[in-house]
Image: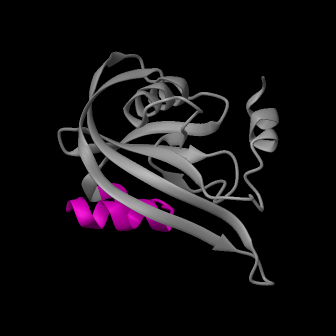
Amino acid sequence: MHVGEFFMKTRREYPKRPLVGVGVVLRRDEEVLLVKRAFPPKAGYYSIPGGLVELGEKIEDAARREISEETGLDIKLEKIVDVIDNIVRDEDGKVKFHYVLVDFLARPAGGDLKSSSDVLEAKWVPFRDLPKYNLTNTAENLFRKLGFL
């Protein structure tokens, strides 16, 4: 199934219930992996890689799968660093997006970095350069919490 089709079939906009997702702060020395989002919410912004947990999938397995799909990399998960609610309302106050996100800290363990069709770009960014990027609020808050910003 094409990524755009999957995006529409999962009913991300105006969902009936919160969707569970994972994100991965992939750190390599004093760099972090950023992806430029291809789809809403925040299409065109930089964030950490991640995506939705599939039915019957453990969150750790979802994190590994999402990183592999989006970036071509294998990872070694270290720990959960945050659990957040990401709720976006439209101009009428209706919930347009609602995600519960479990964010992991991880290290690269192999593979070759390449962008998939659901990210516009994937790149290693030094911590000192993070302020130059148009980060999602959740990524910026997470990087501050971790001391990267």
| Residue extending furthest toward the top | 111
Report the predominant secondary structure element of the magenta stretch: helix
The answer to whether 45 appears left or right of 50 in the picture is right
| Residue extending furthest toward the front | 56
> Along the line of sight, which residue is nearer the eye, 135 or 91?
91
Q: Position of residue 104 (x, y in %)?
A: 32, 44
- Quadrant of image for the C terminus: bottom left
**Residue 146, picture quadrant:** bottom left
* 19 w.r.t. 138: above or below: above
- Quadrant of image for the N terminus: top right
Range drawn in magenta:
129-149
The answer to whether 142 appears left or right of 11 in the picture is left
Q: Position of residue 18 (x, y in %)?
A: 61, 58
> Along the line of sight, which residue is nearer the eye, 23 or 16?
16
- Residue 149 appears in view: no
Number of numbered labels in the structure image? 0
- Residue 138 appears in view: yes
> Along the line of sight, which residue is nearer the eye, 138 or 130?
138
In the rendered structure, does residue 135 fall within the stretch colored magenta?
yes
| Residue extending furthest toward the bottom | 92
**Residue 124, picture quadrant:** top left
**Residue 31, picture quadrant:** top left
Q: Position of residue 137 (x, y in %)?
A: 48, 68
* 18 w.r.t. 93: above or below: above
Q: Residue at x 74, y 59 (%)?
A: 16
